[in-house]
Amino acid sequence: MSNFVQRFTQSRVWRSFFRHGWPDNPLDRSLVMTTNIFFHLHPVKVSRKSLKATYSLGLGVISLITFLVLSITGLLLMFYYVPTVERAYSNIVTLQTMVPFGQLLRNMHRWSAHLMVLVVVLHMARVFYTGAYKPPREFNWVLGVVLLLLTLGASFTGYLLPWDQLAFWAITVGTSVAAYEPLMGSTIKTFLLGGPEVGQEALTRFYALHVMLIPLGIALVTSIHIWRVRKDGGLAANQAPEEKP
Ligand code: HEM
């Protein structure tokens, strides 16, 4: 039996999964970290402090999880939702009242959206209060600001889609406020609405932004953001006190 195990762990099948030996020496330990998709968020060496749940509160990871829940539930909502002024509202009512688990699906999407905005803001506050925005992490802070804006953009564009009174008037007020922005205000309003008021053109544009452009942007920038965390040496707590800027 042990001979079989030994031969199997040396076989090409095993090696295709695990490209390193049992991690009982520094080289194999570092190979475990760099070749595993789940571990490679961390650099090869991490301090105990950065792994403590009370340091980061896991808020970045929770932001990512809410985004994944939103992507999956959003995709399922697209099976039923048609972005036209005639059908959008009735689609949502049908989804809630006649589709099995429809109300659960919609509520999961809605609550995850609220949670994502809250958690991203808390994550930003945590990064600020631990001083993790300082060099060499300033670029990642800028990426974070882009992610915050994209998250708020996703929230704002999603708000119109149910096409109920609340949605219609909230976007009417929101886009009118945007028009007061100096220099580009009226351009932004026209870009969002595709016309002088909230109508089919606005619904089409908000839908395209909400289901394609913004989620793709979040997925791309988040990938670079998390990759940068590792390239910057892991969480700021990893640095020895004398290295801290
Ligand atoms: C979609 C939104 C976001 C996602 C999915 C995300 C994800 C993450 C993850 C997974 C980490 C590493 C673990 C952790 O700190 O929990 C991290 C770290 C970091 N994030 Fe974010 N983040 C987001 C938004 C932001 C925002 C809004 C900022 C600031 C403006 C920001 C700045 C940073 C910085 C500077 C670090 C390194 C922290 C350190 O070294 O201690 N992130 N982020």
Image (cartoon, rainbow, N blue to C red):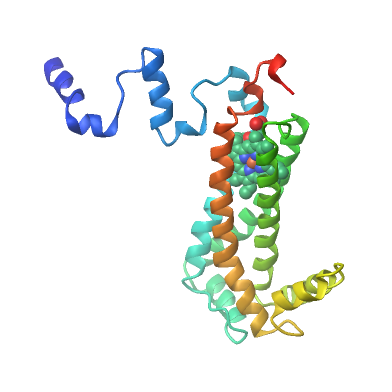
Q: Quadrant of the C terminus?
A: top right
Instruction: Give the camera-side residue of 175 and 181.
Output: 181
- Counting from the top left corner in percent of width and height, residue 199 is at 69, 84
Residue 143 to residue 189: above or below? above
Residue 12 left/right relative to 73: left
Q: Quadrant of residue 172?
A: bottom right
Instruction: Give the camera-side residue of 196 and 113.
Output: 196
Q: Quadrant of the N terminus?
A: top left
Disc tally is 0
- Res. 237 in view: yes
Which residue is drawn at the image coordinates 58% and 37% (left, top)? Answer: 228
Q: Quadrant of residue 22?
A: top left
- Res. 58 in view: no
Residue 237 left/right relative to 181: left
Which residue is drawn at the image coordinates 46% and 32% (left, top)? Answer: 40
- Counting from the top left corner in percent of width and height, residue 31 is at 38, 24
Farthest residue toward the bottom?
86
- Counting from the top left corner in percent of width and height, residue 215 is at 56, 59
Quadrant containing ligand 1: top right
Residue 176 to residue 67: above or below? below
Q: Quadrant of residue 166?
A: bottom right
Which residue is drawn at the image coordinates 66% and 57% (left, top)? Answer: 150
- Counting from the top left corner in percent of width and height, residue 9 is at 20, 23
Instruction: Give the camera-side residue of 14 and 43.
Output: 43
Residue 124 left/right relative to 106: right
Instruction: Give the camera-side residue of 128 and 228.
Output: 228
